[in-house]
Amino acid sequence: MSNIISSLGGGSGIDTTGLVSQLTQIERAPKEERLDSRQETLESQISAYGTLKSALSEFQGVLSPLGNSDTFNARSVAFPDSDIITPNSLAAGAQTGSYQIEVESIASAQTLVMGNSSDAKTALGASGELSIQFGEWAYDASDVPTGFTVNGDQAALSITVEASDSLQAIADKINESDSGIQASVMNVDGQYQLMLNSSSGADNAMQITASDPSLSGFEFNLGNQSALETQQASDAVMKVNGLRVTRQSNTIDDVISGFNFTLNKAAVGEKVNFSVDTDTGVAEQAVRDFVEAYNSFLTTAKNLTGYSKDESNNTVRGDLATDGSAKTLIRRLREMVGGEVAGVSSGFTALTNIGIRTERDGSLSITEKEFSAAFNDNFDLVGELFAQKTSSNNPYVEVGTGTRIGDAVPGDYEINITQDPRKGSLTGSDLGALFDTPLDTSAGDYSFSINVNGISSEVITLSGTYNSADELVTDLQSLINGDSNLKAVNAAVDVSFDSATGQVSFTSRDYGSSSNVSLANQGADMGLLGLDSGNVSAIAGRDVVGTVNGQPGFGAGDVLLPELGSDAYGMNFTVRPGAAAEGAFSINFSRGLGGELDNLISNLLSNSGSIATREENIGDQLDKISSDREVLDRRMEQYEARLTAQFLAMEKIVSSLQSTGDSLDGILDRLPFTAKNG
């Protein structure tokens, strides 16, 4: 019996703890291997998506110039070394041609010096209003001013001078007005003087009048020229291909469209010759860079989603070879590159039209002969293939693009303008024979305030002498647009005179239902100008009204916006009066291949794009693996506890058997009628 008990292992020192641990590990191993393998795969996919995003971003960087129309409007200029003219910049789309410029004179700014003082910061004790108007002075043979013509396009300036103001304080107020005048205080032989420089150009000279005699030393007008004019205002004069041209500034950007240059000095008889030409090389290089970048991206994409060979020529499966999302987005890119460009319905509609072929492996190749012919013979069509373009067959409607243009669907749209936009205006009554003799407004009450687009001006007072209605309206426009209340909100008017009706009109410069003009607080003599309260008629402004593909648009002033969420949303249409008479018309919108690819990649890489969605899904699966590991740990703990309990129960049984065995030792010897073996 003792031998039987011993064979059961009781008291044999079995390592039940180690045995339980080994059994638990055996149970855990296959489950943990599956989790490890799954985690490794998902982490590899996350890393692979990072590589894919990097490749997409790099490819997108090449698309930026390709989708920009400026790339296909690049220009080059052959300009000689010259101290007469300095070329500053050449914009895309500059007017091409051969040019010859002869500079007869350069522009200068009027300079006035005034107000002697022993100290720049000592109070002058003078107070009142300094009124500064801009315009052109006429001079006699001795350079004495003989007349001043107001520049109605330049707002007048009014400076309030207080008794505590110094020359420096007055200069600061003028500089803060943003009027174009540069004011400074100069020390001349121990005396400080205020120096004013207007903007260059004959039409930007200054006429200064003061409301109080204490400021008479600052005046420069026909009646008082206490201020000293040290330099007259003049225009730049030049001949461009024999045509005489004048400009207010020496820096000129509107004579040859897109070409900015500076006149340095007059040089009569000396001609500067140069040419502006189309530069196709910029665009050609951009297209070649695109082909190279696409092929590089495609190689990376194939390695990630397909099979490749390593250095040992072993087949390696890409980390995204089984990922349907990655394969789908790459397929979308390939289809876009190889297909026709949305919105381009004529001319070059696909890469194959310019000699770019798709090979069997999906890469692009250039057929040089066809490629060169496309750039040499049909360069405009190449630009339309790659770059964004909008067009309208209504001369009164301009198509623009907004920040949401990425949502717009390329193609043709039918637009119908049913109501032109209008500016608010106000018209007075017939002036009759008012200007048969000069009108002196200084002796009467020619004051008023004007409300433009809901903003009221300060009281405006006429005090000059006018020989014609044209002089009157020019001065009115300058004074109104110089009002501080109106300038603060960029409200302005155009004042005109209709010689046929003899009426003065005020027209807001803004379109829309909020555009309006009204007069108030008219002085007793404003009726002579046909502008008293009983003789004016107002017309309210209105917004443009129209439809886009049959859907009502939203009119805001002269801008028509498509319905929110419609195919055209992202475009805007600037409408000028006359558009409604044209009837229904069409517009076309195309992003070009560069724009379409850029838009697609931007969507793919966005926070709500397919890549972000897929990465989020992989992240969720990784989180699930972490949860599964916690569940596995709990199950293994329970399994280990169950095994331990079973082995403990076994030990108790073995121990019990061992105790029973001990008690049976020698029992035969103690039984009666038994004898030991000898």
Image: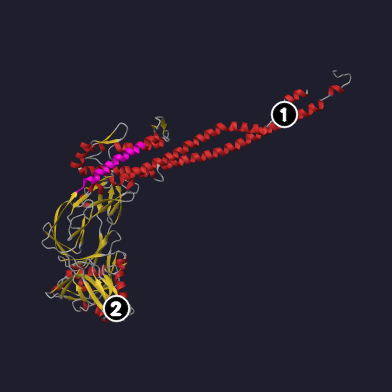
Residue designated by label 1? 12
**Can residue 633 be seen in this snapshot?**
yes
Q: Nearer the viewer, residue 256 or 549?
A: 256
| Label 2 to label 1: alpha-carbon separation | 119 Å
Quadrant including the C terminus: top right
Q: Main secondary structure of the magenta part?
A: helix
Q: Nearer the viewer, residue 279 or 463?
A: 279
In magenta stretch: residue 221? no
Earlier sequence position, callout 2 versus callout 1: 1
Q: Position of residue 531 (x, y in %)?
A: 23, 70
Mark 2 or mark 1, whichever is nearer to me: 1
Q: Nearer the viewer, residue 596 or 320?
A: 320
Q: Which mark is residue 22?
A: none
The residue segment tinted magenta is: 278-299
**Can residue 566 be seen in this snapshot?**
no
Q: Is residue 209 above or below residue 561?
A: below
In magenta stretch: residue 288? yes
In the displayed orientation, state which residue is furthest to the top.
Answer: 678
Q: Residues within 10 Å of mark 1 (few under 14, many from 20)?
A: few
Element under disc 1: loop
* Residue kind at label 2, given as amino acid type: Gly
Q: Position of residue 7 (x, y in %)?
A: 73, 24
Q: Position of residue 637 (x, y in %)?
A: 62, 37
Quadrant including the N terminus: top right
Q: Position of residue 587 (x, y in %)?
A: 25, 46
* Residue kind at label 1, given as amino acid type: Ser
Residue designated by label 2? 128
Q: Is residue 538 above or below residue 661?
A: below
